[in-house]
Amino acid sequence: MIIHPFGGGVASAHGLGKNHLGGKGANLHEMAGIGLPVPPGFVIPTPVCADHYAAGGTLPPALLPEIAAGIGHIETAVASGARFGDADHPLLVSVRSGARVSMPGMMDTVLNLGLNDATVLGLAARSGDARFAWDSYRRFVQMYGDVVLGIDHYLFEDALEYAKEDKGVSLDTELDADDLKALVAAYLGIVEREQGAPFPQDVTAQLHGAVAAVFGSWRSERADVYRRLNDIPEDWGTAVTVQAMVFGNRGETSATGVAFTRDPSTGERGYYGEYLLNAQGEDVVAGIRTPQYLTRAAREKAGAKAASMEEALPVVYAELAALFDLLERHYRDMQDIEFTVEQGKLFVLQTRSGKRTAKAALKIACDMVEEGLIDQRTAILRVDPAMLDQMLHPTLDPAAKRDVIVRGLPASPGAASGAIVLDSETAEKRAAMGEDVILVRVETSPEDIAGMHAARGILTARGGMTSHAAVVARGMGRPCVSGAGNLAIDMNARSVRFGGVELAEGAVITLDGANGEVMRGTVATVQPELTGDFARLMLWADAHRTMAVRTNAETPADCATARSFGAEGIGLARTEHMFFSPERIVSVREMILAADEAGRRAALAKLLPAQREDFRAIFGIMAGLPVTVRLLDPPLHEFLPQREADFADVADATGVGVDVLKRRNAELHEFNPMLGHRGCRLGVTFPEIYEMQARAIFEAAVAVAQEAGVAPLPEVMVPLVGTRRELTLMKAVIDAAAEAVFAETGVRVPYLVGTMIELPRAALRAGEIAEDAEFFSFGTNDLTQTTLGISRDDASRFLGVYVDKGIYAHDPFVTLDVDGVGELVRIAAERGRAARPGLKLGICGEHGGDPASIAFCQTLGLDYVSCSPWRVPIARLAAAQAALR
Ligand code: PEP
Ligand code: MG
């Protein structure tokens, strides 16, 4: 037997697999194999496709009797008495393609095959619906004419339009049976004119023609292109499935619907779905009629009148409900089922894993472990880590109406509504009065931190996914939309223009940080719940992962949040973020603008106690967990005074004239600050800065060790190292500060000194650098910027086009460019470990919270990933999945 029949208790090729049966054919056999009532049919397997081409594009003669036998199987299995080509009780079939992998829309399908001038009358009489019969025939002639006979489909479409014009109506549904009968005559005329022969009335000839056409579509131009783009070999071929058509529109005992085996939005056990009595699937999709509830309970809960399926078709409903358990036991997942009831007989057309919300995904995974359907491992692998974002931020009510005024990048997830404020000070003031505000800026700088903290959300006109606004907002868990190109801010008029809409400061807007939309007014939100299932799955994940998960945090609040989400240490505390509070900024500027070392030391002395207190707080919260403190790394321009008042403040504090300060300021101007005097270059030129910071770290560590009795684990990290010598010099400064503090206090604490690897040179020379470094932390934000030569703050202007054109598969600032940047990370890891076995390796760029990048880190055997507090649960799950895979 060449063909493989299924349905009516038969699953002849169950287990033969997709390569032989095609994806669709294999699914149908699997469904038939577990006893689901699928409409019967047969599969002509993929190898026949090659035979067809070998025979010069005609069906192999041996296939013809088999097709006849297949039709015989369908006639027996439908058990309704319908026969293929029978004028009184016709059987109709569909003919579909199906390759090993799905190639959506690439190949051809023919529906309602088996209709002709005689059988259409039988169908009309049997169904009691002449309009339905003639409409089916009309569709069939058009589809067959187009797909099998190669007649331009617009000829049919034109004829349909004329028919509607003649009648003076605009919708297809307004044509009655007689109109459609006339239209069929017109269609048959078109076919005869175009191909010089009448439309085939012999149903067997129709079927042979359709099978040959489906095989032919495997080598159609569009399929060829698709195969080339997706690396699908031509010799795979397609299978052909011939299957009985079933109709849900044959009276009040017929219906069509969709069902889920559990509630896809909550995950609750219980049947869930919709159906329409006496309708075809199309009627549901077209939204012409409102679907009714599946269960009586759901109908009553909604206060709906129209009978539920449980009430209208109780026997079939019971049959369907019994299938749900069968399906879940077999597929071991929540299923989304399409079904049709034809005159009281239930058919399952399709079943697949149902889409679900994060909340439902967690509940279903946990419940199924409890029910013994899946193990913990499967549960961990089944929840998409990226989805957990939904659980960690308030989100917009999906049912709420949106008046979108501008779009930007989805820089930090969550939703926020509030009044527009245009500067940080206003944000703080109005927030202090209890108002919800959204900080709207061209771009943000570290000076805006307080305002960003005060705001509910942040919107910027410039900046990409790793711009300051984006990084800080994610760290704080504030929703942020960045790089909204159509946003213009007028600081004089204190207003904002969103394309055509102008809004004054104080007007209320809403941000959706999950998709980058900005709406006018307030949009209702729903509060996330950290349910027990969430916590449970996280613990299972922890038991399976091998990489630790740390956080990027420097404020006590963020550290505490991260710990509550399960962070196992700090992978990056950016100390420059500690320098921007209003009390400190003057001393910072004093330090930078100082004319000599003595001036700098005087300013640093004022900062030391504040830094020490910062570190004390962090070490206290992290209670013995490792804390990586990065020494100062600001692009200098972010610190420099901008306004007259700023200069006056520094002049007051130092006694140096404003003119002198301005001159010094001008000298410090840089054309390309990201590649300028930042990172350890600051420490190399002004070692006293790192000396002060190191002292603050060790004084704090000693104090906490004495007070709390648990020694903190400081890991002092030097940024932007490119050569070993830079690290050698900085390590000497750090070690000297440590020894000085230990000598003064008589207490020693353990510590490590290491470096960020965030320049290509550092990655390549990692072998030497590891001689001095006790750990590496991959700063993949800068490493991406410097490897690709793309500014992280300016990328948003063109990167979208680059992704659209497939130049980069993803935004490389979000998902690590494994081929380029990843190669450097691999080289650095290998060379570093070769020089220093046991070298601790981590990642602290934004990629540390991205599941695909985390999977790559696992392949390199990194010790930990570090990400913003709000992504810690995502990283825990992603790391577990990476380890399990
Ligand atoms: C990095 O460059 O990846 C990094 C973590 O440092 P920053 O983002 O502060 O430059
Ligand atoms: Mg960096």
Image: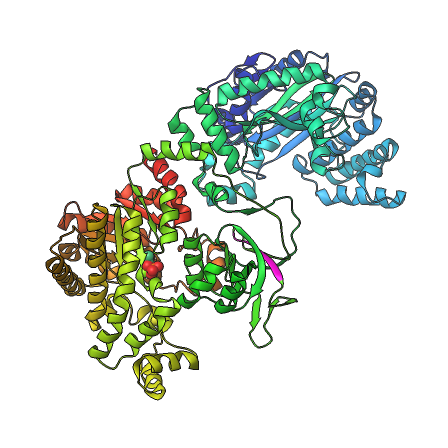
Q: Is residue 29 left or right of residue 840?
A: right
> How is this picture coloured?
rainbow
The residue positioned 50% from the left and 32% from the top of the image is 237
Does 670 sit above or below residue 254? Answer: below
Picture mark count: 0
Splitting the image into four quadrants, where does ligand 1 fall? bottom left
Range covered by the magenta-colored residues: 508-513
Q: Is residue 486 left or right of residue 838?
A: right
Does 122 sit above or below residue 279? Answer: above
The quarter of the rendered structure image containing the C terminus is: top left
The percent position of residue 816, horizontal first and vertical second, equals 36, 51
Q: Observer-nearest residue: 464 or 569?
A: 569
Does 61 sit above or below residue 411? Answer: above
Q: Is residue 755 left or right of residue 801?
A: left
The answer to whether residue 135 is visible is: yes
The residue positioned 42% from the left and 48% from the top of the image is 870
Does 90 sit above or below residue 99? Answer: above
In the rendered image, the residue lying farthest to the front is 707
Q: Is residue 548 left or right of residue 445?
A: left
Q: Is residue 54 magenta?
A: no
